[in-house]
Image: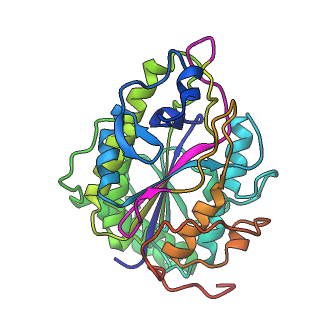
Amino acid sequence: MNGEVLVVLSLRGGWDSLSAFVPHEDKLYYESRPNLAVAKTLELGGPFRIHPAMRSLRDLYRGGNLAIIPAAGLWQDTRSHFQATAWMDGGIPGRSAPTGWLARYLARMQLEPGGFPAVALGVPSQALQGFPRTVGMDDLDELDFTLPREDLADSLMDDASRNALQALRTAREVAERAECGEVEYPDTDLGWELSQAARLIRCQDLGVRVVTLELDGFDTHSWQNDTLPDLLTDVSDSLAAFAEDLDGLPVTTVVMSEFGRTLAENSSQGTDHGRASAMLVMGQGIRGGIYGRWPELAEVTEVTVDYRSVLGEVLEKRLGCAALGEIFPGCTEFQALGLTELDRPLRAPLAAGS
């Protein structure tokens, strides 16, 4: 397999990472959440314990290839899902961007013609906005690119159209082959999409470099304990299956959300829009552990790690893209977290302007 693949899973709605990774040493957590505080938790490390619904993720963490950044997010304060998502996916917090950060990264890559360098499974990600070779799909088995007189059509096309046609042919061939692994995924939308992502990544003919996915439902303003445990189980079990399925392959997975939730529960036994959330990075060569500075708990939890520092380190250390100032314009300082065990990128660094 040539080169690292980046998978980005966005948890939409603003996930309550304080329930996922419980700051059990801080009394304020329990005082602020008389109904929502997670009482029965599993050992994790440092000041945190983990929600029992995330046992699979805890096991993955103990395996040493999962990094948790518990106070990451946007420096800019906003309670708007739309605005926070646009800023985060655009990579330029505080203003709208005509292209997404993943689109700007892919534009710098030395990509082979044809293939599917960027795949959006389910809802298209704004982070890929502006990259013309993005393919959106729900189910690889439902791809149908039977074209009449392909030989004649091929002769009348220009190079770009011919490359696109070849990519469609390759996708059709992949869809006809049994590319499913032996790993059992959860019977959920996320489990299905991650199984499709693994199938696409394993097929080297497709040349996949970036895959984006989204899971909605984390806007838990009311009766949070009725819905959040199932969501956490889904995330945990699906990611664990994905990691097992692609064990040994150069794939880095990043999990992020547009913001977190307030520390204090509301009158509807839910939580409202907050600031910091947790980011996850997993893959072979990721140095497992908890990163960043954990702040004192407050009504709106402080952001201590700019999310772009996490993404920047993944891009630079894992994918060999050193031009972070072009991927994230206006960001002049990237905090070194030390997420990776590798001393060199898995891909050769790209030349400026490439």
Above-or-below relation of 261 to 191? above
Q: Is residue 274 a member of the stretch shown in magenta? A: yes
Question: Looking at the image, which residue is at 45% across and 23% down?
Answer: 227
Q: Quadrant of the N terminus?
A: bottom left
Q: Residue 151 at x, y = what percent?
A: 40, 74
Above-or-below relation of 277 to 223? below
Magenta segment main secondary structure: loop
Does residue 178 appear to the left or right of 150 in the view shown? left
Q: Is residue 117 a member of the stretch shown in magenta? A: no
Q: Residue 39 at x, y = what percent?
A: 40, 24
Q: Residue 100 at x, y = what percent?
A: 67, 59
Q: Nearer the viewer, residue 343 or 90?
A: 343
Question: Looking at the image, which residue is at 31% across and 66% down?
Answer: 202
| Residues drawn in magenta | 266-290
Q: Is residue 195 visible?
A: no
Q: Quadrant of the C terminus?
A: bottom right
Does residue 137 appear to the left or right of 294 in the view shown? left
